[in-house]
Image (tube, rainbow, N blue to C red):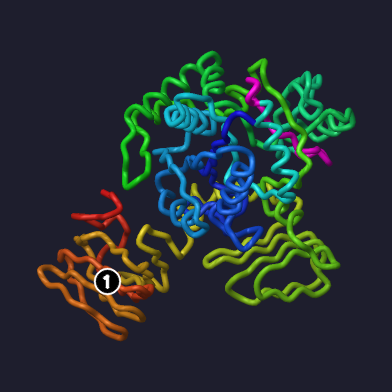
């Protein structure tokens, strides 16, 4: 192979069909749904191992929403992978994300045209050797100027997937075919008839193409997307090691999938049939299919007791869940919400989330535990004019220097040692010690120790919203 591979991991999905575990502030790619690692971590490790084994791999490029930048950074650091993390001010679908990644890769490799291996961060793949073989074959085909997609053998009609019909074999390559056409989510009967031809694959949403080559096709087919992406890169800034795209330019970019913008319109699309096991983990039904099941067809996680129960998925991490005399159910218990659904209707969970959003319910947005670059906080109790939270501050991290106009706070150290700035004073608090922060007083909480700092925070006041924060200094660049 004459060219190196640059993995591009697209990390902007919301995963609303996996509610209540997946939420807008903690979508499915950041959750350990299939293995002991998160989907993002599994994707990054798979990409690194595959690209390293191929040829002179480059550091991966990860494109994510700016709200998730520290989650991405922390999760990659946990598995020892460095990455160039590109921050989108808002989602503009995959064509824009691929465009900015291709521009960044081309700028970093001016002398050649690196092959981009474009992967979704929230897919599950089994069969490492088969995956490597498919990627290396795709990279060879991409080096010839083709734009390659990976086709998954379609085993059943599924309205949740797009389809690819293969055409003639590529000359000199028995494992790759020209794409005859793409069909986006056809009705079941049409999909069944297509599958019977033996030339049909599910569209995996994974691609391989030269960085400069895909930019050429974007220039020809969607110059508006390419122009906006170039402007976003040109006005990008370095922010604590992240590449923050120019906001105004990027928001002007049309929202379009790379499939529709380029792959469905180019004359140079190729498909490589994939021999590995693949799932987009797009719903609880898909996760049930992927999971290990008992003799009755049940997939279970957590403290679960199943009696006379068949073909169900039961997940819980807080309470005992007992079932009796049911089948084909999805039961998912989270910290603040319980989902019970017919397994055949798991694709419709997204509609539940939309209803919650329209009702202005916070459960669509976040869990009780909310992650911050310094650690996390989680709600313990709340009532009229008071709120109790549990805070964890990571070693070496600190909250911003801030004040609140409408609330006071009382901090109690549960474990660790806190360095507290309170007005003009600096004090240290050990386990079982506390301090009071009056309304309007500048304050900061820091952990300069080597162990996590756990705090109970009691808020009291006329308004307790998170927007009552006036920051004066923040090491994470938040305003």
Location of residue 180 with respect to 300 vertically, above or below? above
Task: Tell me residue 175's x, y (percent).
Answer: 79, 30
How many marks can you see?
1
| Range covered by the magenta-colored residues | 142-158
Q: Is residue 372 visible?
A: yes
* Nearer to me, 209 or 339: 209
Q: What residue is at 63 percent from the left and 20 percent from the top?
A: 145
* 155 drawn magenta: yes
Location of residue 157 with respect to 167 vertically, above or below? below
Task: Name the secondary structure under disc 1.
Answer: strand
Indicate left or right for 361 with 320 as reference: left
Q: Residues within 10 Å of mark 1 (few under 14, many from 20)?
A: many
Indicate left or right for 463 with 120 as reference: left
Q: Is residue 351 visible?
A: no
Identify the residue under disc 1. Answer: 460
Furthest-top residue in view?
220
Location of residue 187 with respect to 414 vertically, above or below? above
* Nearer to me, 394 or 138: 138
Task: Tell me residue 243's x, y (percent).
Answer: 37, 39
Indicate left or right for 311 with 351 as reference: right
* Quarter residue 313 falls in: bottom right
């Amino acid at each position: 192979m004459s060219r190196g591979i640059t993995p591009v991991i697209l990390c902007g999905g919301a995963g609303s069909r996996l509610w209540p575990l997946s939420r807008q502030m903690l979508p499915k790619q950041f959750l350990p749904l299939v293995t002991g690692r998160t989907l993002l971590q599994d994707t990054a490790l798979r990409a690194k191992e595959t690209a390293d084994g191929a040829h002179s791999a480059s550091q991966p490029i990860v494109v994510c929403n700016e709200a998730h930048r520290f989650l991405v950074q922390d999760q990659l650091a946990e598995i020892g992978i460095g990455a160039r993390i590109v921050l989108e001010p808002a989602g503009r679908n995959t064509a824009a994300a691929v465009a900015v990644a291709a521009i960044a890769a081309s700028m970093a490799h001016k002398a050649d045209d690196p092959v981009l291996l474009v992967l979704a961060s929230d897919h599950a793949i089994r069969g490492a050797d088969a995956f490597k073989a498919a990627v290396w074959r795709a990279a060879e085909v991409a080096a010839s100027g083709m734009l390659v997609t990976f086709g998954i053998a379609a085993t059943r009609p599924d309205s949740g997937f797009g389809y690819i019909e293969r055409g003639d074999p590529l000359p000199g390559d028995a494992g790759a075919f020209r794409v005859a056409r793409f069909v986006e989510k056809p009705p079941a009967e049409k999909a069944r008839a297509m599958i019977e031809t033996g030339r049909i694959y599910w569209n995996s949403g994974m691609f391989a193409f030269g960085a400069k080559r895909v930019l050429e096709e974007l220039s020809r087919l969607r110059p508006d997307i390419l122009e906006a992406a170039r402007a976003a890169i040109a006005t990008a800034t370095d922010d604590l090691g992240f590449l923050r795209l120019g906001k105004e330019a990027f928001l002007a970019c049309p929202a379009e999938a790379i499939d529709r913008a380029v792959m469905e319109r180019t004359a140079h699309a190729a498909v490589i049939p994939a021999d590995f096991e693949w799932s987009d983990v797009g719903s609880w039904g898909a996760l049930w299919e992927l999971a290990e099941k008992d003799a009755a067809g049940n997939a279970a996680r957590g403290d679960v007791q199943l009696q006379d129960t068949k073909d169900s998925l039961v997940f819980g991490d807080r309470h005992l869940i007992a079932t009796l005399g049911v089948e084909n159910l999805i039961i998912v218990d989270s910290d603040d919400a319980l989902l019970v659904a017919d397994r055949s209707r798991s694709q419709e969970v997204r509609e539940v989330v939309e209803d919650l959003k329209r009702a202005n319910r916070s459960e669509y947005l976040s869990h009780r535990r909310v992650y911050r670059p310094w650690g996390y906080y989680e709600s313990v109790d709340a009532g009229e004019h008071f709120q109790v939270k549990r805070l964890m501050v990571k070693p070496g991290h600190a909250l911003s220097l801030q004040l609140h106009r409408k609330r006071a706070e009382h901090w109690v150290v549960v474990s660790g040692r806190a360095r507290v700035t309170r007005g003009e004073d600096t004090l240290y608090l050990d386990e079982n010690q506390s301090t009071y922060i009056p309304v309007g007083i500048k304050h900061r909480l820091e952990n300069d120790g080597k162990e996590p700092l756990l705090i109970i925070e009691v808020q009291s006041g006329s308004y307790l919203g998170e927007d009552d924060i006036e920051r004066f200094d923040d090491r994470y660049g938040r305003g």
